[in-house]
Amino acid sequence: MFSSLDGKIRQTIWGLKDHHKYFEEPAAKIKTDAWLVGRVTMQEFSSRRKHKLHKGGPYLSKEDFVASQPLKKFAVVIDPSGKCFWDVNNVSTEHVIEVLTEKVSSAYLSHLRDKNVSYVFAGKKELNLDLVLRKLYKLFGIKNLRIDGGGHVNGTFLKAGLIDEVSLVVAPIVDGTTGNLSSFEVDNTFGKRKATHFRLKSFKRIYNDFLWLRYETVRGKVVR
């Protein structure tokens, strides 16, 4: 993740040129099999054209689809309702995998198959994130998955207890806005959930005044 000193996700008021390098270059140094984002983030990479779904076609059962293709790295999108459309089945050098619920239509599945985009189902109406990870491992051999946000996606994985490490680049900037998303958006209130604790793994000064922090999750006890 990439955040300000007050924990906010980047926005245009930061005034950074070539802002992608600040998190993409450090992230590239962490060995992973795939990266994962939410639907809103992935729409920056998916088709910009308007696609019309062809209704009235054959019914497609809600079964996982593994496309035949040569790429061994993957770009995964959490897209429960099926709102991302594709012209090709890859983002740069990564094959696209859509994570869906069973409420998506056969017409949308036909679009994905037509573009040779892989997809998996992980729930009828709500996603089971543990099942998502198990399917990504079983069907695609994904062992190490990098979650690139946004804040709601990060927060849902955090709440589910499925994050092993946090890699965070902190910009020497205070955002100061109200309502802008933070790196982890979980709940309005904690309820029965406890805050997640981490142990510092490494830190490095980069790009003059930026900090690259890596933390590993502490499980089963509170850090003192």
Image (spheres, helix red, strand yellow):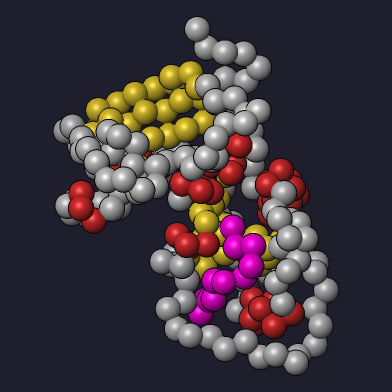
Give the residues in magenta. 78-88
Question: Where residue 153 sits: x, y (%)?
Answer: 53, 48
Q: Residue at x 65, y 28 (%)?
A: 192
Of 193 and 128, the residue lying toward us: 193
Question: Where residue 65 sits: x, y (%)?
Answer: 74, 67
Give the quadrant of the N terminus.
top left
Q: Is residue 24 left or right of residue 155?
A: left
Q: Is residue 194 left or right of residue 177?
A: right
Of 121 and 114, the residue lying toward us: 121
- Tell me if I can see residue 127 in this picture: yes
How many numbered discs? Answer: 0
Question: Where residue 46 sits: x, y (%)?
Answer: 47, 71
Q: Residue at x 69, y 53 (%)?
A: 127
205 in relation to 154, above or below: above
Task: Kindly report the secondary structure that dominates the magenta region of the rendered protein.
Answer: loop
Question: Where residue 7 sits: x, y (%)?
Answer: 34, 36
Q: Image quarter for residue 169?
A: top left
79 magenta-colored: yes
139 in relation to 1, above or below: below
- Tell me if I can see residue 89 in this picture: no
61 in relation to 27, above or below: below
Q: Residue at x 80, y 69 (%)?
A: 62
179 magenta-colored: no
Q: Residue at x 47, y 40 (%)?
A: 184
